[in-house]
Image (cartoon, rainbow, N blue to C red):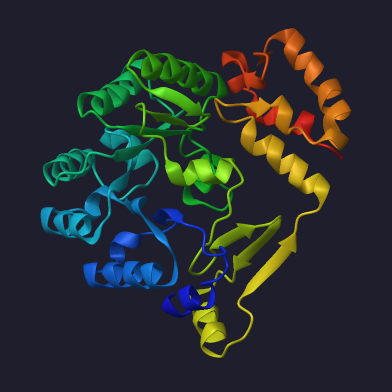
C-alpha cells in the first residue's frame, strides 16, 4: 500500500485532500504504528487539508480505551462503528460476532476518548424486529448524541450463510412491508430529533454529513489504495485486483495491478442520475446534460404527477413516498 501511494502520487493532480477514509474491510486490524505510517506516507505525497475529515471504520469488539486514544493522537477525527443493532437476538440472526454490550461499551469508550464525530451503522427489516425494538435502537443513538446514522435495510446476499438458512427454511426471510414501515418510522423519528436526511440511507446532525461519502455522490475525484480499491477521475474508473497475494506480487514486480474503464457519455449520465437522486439536494435542472434533457423530462413526468418526485424550482427531489422506490425511479430515468 505504501508503494501504491507513491505510484499514485499524481493521480489527483495535487488537489487538496479533504477526506481520508480507512474502511471497506477491517482497518482496526492495523497497529497504530501502521496507521501512523500510512498517514505520513499520504501526507508526504498529497496536499492534505489541516482540517481533513479522517474516518476510521471499526467493529465494536475491536475497540478499547488505549487504541482509541492512539487513533485520536494519530489524527483520526471521525469514527464509523458497525453497531448494526443493540439487541443480541438481531446480532445472532445476522451471524455477527459482537454483542450488544460490546456496542454500548464501544460508543461509551469513544466518547470518553474525546471523539465528537461518531457515526454508527444500524440495520432494519430484520425478521421479528418490531417498531418498538427499532425505535429503541434509534433512541439509543439519540441518547448518546451520535452525530451520524447510516441505516440500511437487511439484504440477503447470495451464497451467504443467511441465504442458505432461509433457502432451507431454517430461518425467516425479511418482510418487505415491515421493512418499508420501519424505514418510514426511521425517517420521521430521526428528522424529528434533529437529524437531516441528506441521502437515502444517511442521517446527520447539522454540519456532520459524511464529507467522504458526499464526495462520491457529487462526482468528486477520489483515489483508492489497497486490494479491490476503486479510484475515479475525469470519467475514468479504476479498480485494483482483489486478491491480496496477487496485489502484492503485481505491485512488487511493477506489473499492472488494476483494471480501467472509460465511462462513455451514457454511463456518465446514468451515474449522475443514480447518485444525485439519492440525495436531499436532488437533481439540479441546471446540471442535466442538454443532450439528455428531453429524455429526462419525458421520464420524470409520471413521477411528478404521482408525487414521488417534486420540483422546487431548481431541483428534482424525491418525496417521502419516492424514497421508498428510489431505485425504480433511477432505472426509469436512465438512458438506454
**Which of the image's four quarters has the C terminus?**
top right
Q: Which of these two is toward me, 176 or 69? A: 69
Q: Is residue 185 above or below residue 295?
A: above
Q: Is residue 229 above or below residue 312?
A: below
Q: Which percent across, then down, holds residue 224?
A: 52, 62
Left or right, residue 143 beside residue 243? left
Q: Is residue 106 above or below residue 273?
A: below
Q: Which of these two is toward me, 197 or 184? A: 197
Left or right, residue 264 beside residue 209? right
Q: Residue at x 20, y 43 (%)?
A: 115
Q: Which percent across, then down, holds residue 45?
A: 44, 72
Q: Quadrant of residue 211?
A: top left
Q: Residue at x 59, y 31 (%)?
A: 278
Q: Which percent across, then down, holds residue 97?
A: 30, 51
Q: Quadrant of residue 33?
A: bottom left
Q: Residue at x 53, y 41 (%)?
A: 156
Tally of marks: 0
Q: Residue furthest bottom?
A: 253
Q: Which percent across, then down, holds residue 256?
A: 64, 80
**Which of the image's four quarters has the N terminus?**
bottom left
Amino acid at each position: 500500500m505504501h508503494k501504491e501511494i507513491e505510484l499514485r502520487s499524481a493521480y489527483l493532480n495535487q488537489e487538496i485532500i479533504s477526506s481520508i477514509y480507512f474502511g471497506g474491510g477491517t482497518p482496526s486490524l492495523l497497529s497504530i504504528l501502521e496507521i501512523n505510517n500510512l498517514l505520513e506516507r499520504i501526507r508526504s505525497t498529497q496536499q492534505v487539508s489541516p482540517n481533513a475529515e479522517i474516518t476510521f471504520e471499526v467493529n465494536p469488539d475491536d475497540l478499547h480505551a488505549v487504541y482509541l486514544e492512539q487513533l485520536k493522537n494519530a489524527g483520526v477525527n471521525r469514527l464509523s462503528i458497525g453497531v448494526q443493532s443493540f439487541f443480541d437476538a438481531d446480532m445472532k440472526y445476522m451471524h455477527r460476532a459482537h454483542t450488544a454490550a460490546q456496542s454500548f461499551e464501544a460508543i461509551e469508550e469513544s466518547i470518553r476518548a474525546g471523539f465528537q464525530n461518531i457515526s454508527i451503522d444500524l440495520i432494519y427489516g430484520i425478521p421479528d424486529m418490531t417498531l418498538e425494538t427499532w425505535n429503541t435502537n434509534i433512541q439509543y443513538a439519540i441518547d448518546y448524541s451520535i452525530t451520524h446514522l447510516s441505516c440500511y435495510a437487511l439484504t440477503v446476499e447470495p451464497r451467504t450463510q443467511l441465504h442458505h438458512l432461509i433457502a432451507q427454511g431454517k430461518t425467516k426471510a425479511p418482510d418487505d412491508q415491515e421493512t418499508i414501515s420501519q424505514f418510514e418510522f426511521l425517517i420521521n423519528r430521526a428528522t424529528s430529533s434533529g437529524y437531516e436526511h441528506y441521502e437515502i440511507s444517511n442521517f446527520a446532525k447539522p454540519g456532520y454529513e459524511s464529507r467522504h461519502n458526499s464526495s462520491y455522490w457529487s462526482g468528486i475525484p477520489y483515489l483508492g489504495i489497497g486490494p479491490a480499491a476503486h479510484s475515479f477521475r475525469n470519467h475514468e474508473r479504476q479498480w485494483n485486483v482483489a486478491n491480496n497475494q496477487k496485489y502484492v506480487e503485481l505491485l512488487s514486480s511493477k506489473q499492472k495491478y488494476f483494471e480501467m474503464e472509460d465511462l462513455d457519455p451514457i454511463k456518465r449520465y446514468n451515474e449522475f442520475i443514480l447518485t444525485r437522486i439519492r440525495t436531499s439536494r436532488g437533481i439540479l435542472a441546471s446540471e442535466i446534460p442538454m443532450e439528455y434533457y428531453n429524455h429526462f423530462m419525458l421520464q420524470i413526468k409520471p413521477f411528478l404527477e404521482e408525487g414521488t418526485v417534486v420540483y422546487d424550482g431548481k431541483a428534482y427531489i424525491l418525496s417521502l413516498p419516492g424514497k421508498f422506490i428510489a431505485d425504480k425511479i433511477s432505472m426509469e430515468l436512465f438512458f438506454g
